[in-house]
Image (cartoon, rainbow, N blue to C red):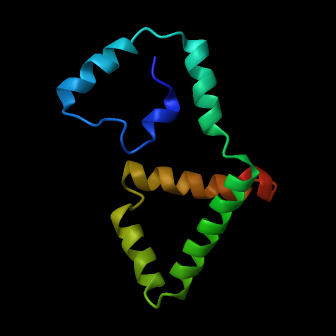
């Protein structure tokens, strides 16, 4: 079993796809409890990671708000994912769900 943390490294698959298939096959029937322990480590960004994500999200939102074409971008998004598409309905449901979240911690 290769550790799940290796998957995120740039050199994880250093060769042709044919060389990767045996590695995938070796992981076909791994101990799920052991692999889950690997994945749990990756899922927890820690306090510093959460703060970094918040800062990056805030910077992205502020950059979009500073753009003169922010309204045009929103209109383009609504045209792309209108309510007569499955994606548009899913985005609207997500937006409504976020409006109903009782506090910021739960929303995050």
**Measured along the vertical axis of the image, is residue 62 above or below residue 14?**
below
Occupied quadrant, residue 29: top left
Q: Quadrant of residue 73?
A: bottom left
- Residue 38: percent from left, percent from top: 59, 26
Residue at image location 62% in from the left, 38% down from the top: 43
Position in image of residue 53 (x %, y %) = 63, 59
Q: Quadrant of the C terminus?
A: bottom right
Q: How many marks?
A: 0
Pick the residue in front: 65 or 12: 12
With 79 as the anchor, is 108 left or right in this view?
right
Image position of 8 (left or right of 100): left
x%, y% of residue 72? 41, 82
**As drawn, 104 above or below 31:** below
Residue 76 location (% of width, % of height): 37, 74
**Residue 71, can we see it?**
yes
Left or right for 73, reference 37: left
Residue name at image x 55 percent, y 19 percent: 35
Q: Can residue 108 be seen from the camera position used here?
A: no
Closest to the observer, 2 or 62: 2
Which residue occupies 40% across, 69% down? Answer: 77
* Residue at the image point whose x is 60% and y is 37% from the top: 42
């Amino acid at each position: 079993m290769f550790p799940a943390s290796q998957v995120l490294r740039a050199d994880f698959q250093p060769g042709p796809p044919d060389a990767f298939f045996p590695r995938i096959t070796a992981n076909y029937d791994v101990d799920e409890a052991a692999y889950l322990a690997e994945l749990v480590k990756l899922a927890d960004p820690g306090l510093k990671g959460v703060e970094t994500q918040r800062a990056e999200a805030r910077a992205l939102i502020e950059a979009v708000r500073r753009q003169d074409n922010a309204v045009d971008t929103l209109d383009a998004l609504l045209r792309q994912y209108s309510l007569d598409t499955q994606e548009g309905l899913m985005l609207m449901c997500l937006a409504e769900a976020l409006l109903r979240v009782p506090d910021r911690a739960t929303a995050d």
